[in-house]
Amino acid sequence: MIAAIDRYLALRRSAGFVLSNAQYLLRSFAAFAAARRERHIRTATLIDWASRAPSSDQRQTRYQTVRQFAEHVRLEDPRHDLPPSNHFGHRKTRRVPRIYTAAEIDRLILAATQLSARDALRPQTYATLISLLAATGLRISEALHLRYGDVTPDGLLIRKTKFQKIRLVPLHETAVAGLGRYLAQRSTVHLATDHVFVDDNGQPLEYGTVYRVFGRLAESAGIAPLRGHRPRLHELRHTFALRALQSTPAGRQRIGQHMLALTTYLGHVSIDSTYWYLESTPELLTDIAAAGEAYLGGGHS
């Protein structure tokens, strides 16, 4: 089974998928099956193996990873079972995201400028990073991978995206000015890397480090946990997307054009992923109420 797994992973990776977790899970299942002297996927074995995961989400991930592999490998060898879809009856739920207010984002940036540092770059690095995430909705991984050559007169060239695509992210003039000020300061520090965002040692910022620092910044900024969950970096992206959706122009055709543009800007594979960011907020509910009243009153929605 291992040889078939390796061929499957190689094929999907040639299409741009990373599949680190899938490789681990498939090899784990293959070892489990081998211990039972099985050379092919058996539904009962898959259920037994997936059931050993401690949570519903993990059981579903295990099961679906192997089932997807089974769909592929059966084309070459029908002796493999095709397990039924969604055996565990799992329904994916997403955490209700925090939508940052403009005041909260301002406090986060202010807290970043007050970070202790051996030089002036660290506070400005985090202040600029948070500002850029809030102004563009970039994924944190995309921002951390930025290099000097990716900052162009037309915007940011995003090379290492979630789906291995390249896209251009235009910037508002205020974002251009803010990033330019930071880069001017960054250029005075002679480092071995050309990454835009670096740590105290001059190395590219790592997500784990940024995650920990952001937690401290949120605490300093007085942003308390919401529904038992601490503030997250990714929610800056969610906030940007929601605000962009709230600015959708009136008219069915213009709404469609706006959504398509936002989908492209965010680097989503489909427009469905963009619609998920449309969360209920007081401002949005007010807009809906106003549109409903206008419609019922004979106005245009």
Image (cartoon, rainbow, N blue to C red):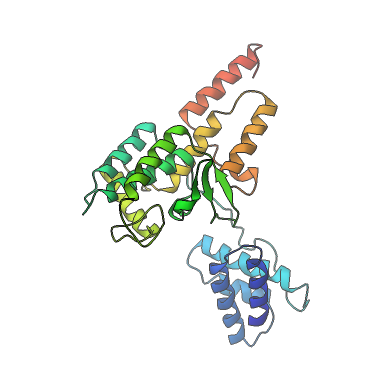
Is residue 225 in view from this perspective?
A: no
Residue at screen point 40% across, 36% down: 177
> From the viewer's perspective, is residue 150 above or below residue 206?
above
Residue at screen point 60% across, 54% down: 165
Q: Is residue 78 left or right of residue 94?
A: right
Residue 91 lies, in percent from the top left, at: 58, 53
Residue 63 lies, in percent from the top left, at: 61, 67
Q: Is residue 223 left or right of residue 99?
A: left
> From the viewer's perspective, is residue 4 above or below residue 90?
below
Numbered label tally: 0
Of 124 and 18, nearer the camera is 124
Residue 251 lies, in percent from the top left, at: 66, 23
Image quadrant containing the N terminus = bottom right
Q: Is residue 286 left or right of residue 190?
A: right
Residue at screen point 54% across, 73% down: 24
Furthest-bottom residue in view?
A: 37
Q: Is residue 113 left or right of residue 204?
A: left
Image quadrant containing the C terminus = top right
Residue 44 lies, in percent from the top left, at: 65, 75
| Quadrant in the rendering for residue 273 | top right
Is residue 8 in view from this perspective?
A: yes
